[in-house]
């Protein structure tokens, strides 16, 4: 394994993933900030593929925050049933839309601090929105990020907020959001939770997990 400082390793990981996955895009389909906010809420414990199947009809029926705020939660439920936890998600979407209308003039906030005040919105979703929509430095800590950055040797914890802080110190922040998108692609293609394909990994030379595996 190449011996690097944590910051050097982070920059190398960014470079290797950029080369391996030139296109770094969110796999959720959306055309405006509110749609990404809602799609990300729906994606909790659900695949992005399933969410993308559900949202076209949902957003056609409810095209803006006002229409979501005025809707019966039971009607929202009908559109999102296949996403799982649909009652909780429908309740959050309704409450979120009402708060957007009442507090934020129907606009999606552009800071993490304001976004996490919305019902059902945590730091993962907030980072995704400020990164993808508003182009601000973001670190989206999802299951792929937690797993892969742990295997690389950046931490040995599961606390998403602490991992976010660690990665903010290590990653070049102008590339951190795309790095997190690439981690999702890499997690699906190579760094599987149960059976990682280490021999095929573009980052194996800097990976602590791989080093321990072959030593």
Image: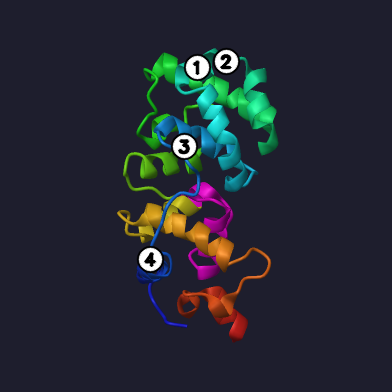
- For the magenta stretch, what is the residue range? 140-162
Residue 141: x %, y % from top left: 50, 51
Residue 60: x %, y % from top left: 51, 26
Q: Secondary structure at mark 3?
A: helix
- The span from disc 2 to disc 1 (Cα, nearest Å) is 6 Å
Residue 131: x %, y % from top left: 37, 44
Of all residues shown, which one is farthest toward the bottom? Answer: 215
Q: How many marks?
A: 4
What residue is pinned by disc 1? Answer: 67
What residue is pinned by disc 4? Answer: 18
The verdict on residue 148 being magenta is yes
When the figure is inspected, residue 61 is found, relative to residue 16, above or below; the finding is: above
What residue is pinned by disc 2? Answer: 71
Residue 13 relative to residue 82: left or right: left
Q: Earlier in the sequence, mark 4 or mark 1?
A: 4
Q: Residue at x 48, y 42 (%)?
A: 29
What residue is pinned by disc 3? Answer: 36
Q: Earlier in the sequence, mark 3 or mark 2?
A: 3
């Amino acid at each position: 394994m190449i011996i690097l400082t944590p910051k050097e390793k982070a920059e190398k990981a960014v470079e290797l993933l950029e080369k391996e996955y030139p296109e770094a895009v969110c796999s959720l389909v959306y055309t405006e900030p509110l749609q990404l906010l809602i799609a990300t809420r729906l994606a909790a414990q659900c695949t992005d593929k399933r969410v993308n199947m559900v949202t076209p009809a949902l957003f056609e029926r409810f095209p803006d925050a006002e229409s979501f705020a005025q809707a019966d939660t039971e009607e929202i439920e009908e559109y999102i049933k296949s996403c799982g936890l649909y009652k909780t998600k429908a309740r959050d979407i309704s409450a979120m839309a009402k708060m957007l209308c009442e507090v934020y003039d129907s606009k999606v906030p552009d800071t993490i601090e304001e976004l996490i005040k919305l019902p059902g919105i945590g730091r993962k979703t907030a980072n995704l929105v400020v990164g993808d929509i508003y182009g601000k430095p973001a670190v989206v800590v999802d299951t792929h990020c937690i797993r892969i950055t742990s295997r690389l040797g950046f931490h040995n914890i599961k606390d998403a907020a602490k991992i976010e802080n660690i990665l903010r110190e290590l990653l070049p922040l102008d590339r951190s959001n795309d790095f997190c998108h690439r981690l999702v692609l890499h997690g699906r293609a190579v760094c599987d939770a149960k059976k990682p394909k280490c021999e095929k990994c573009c980052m194996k030379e800097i990976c602590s997990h791989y080093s321990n595996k072959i030593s």
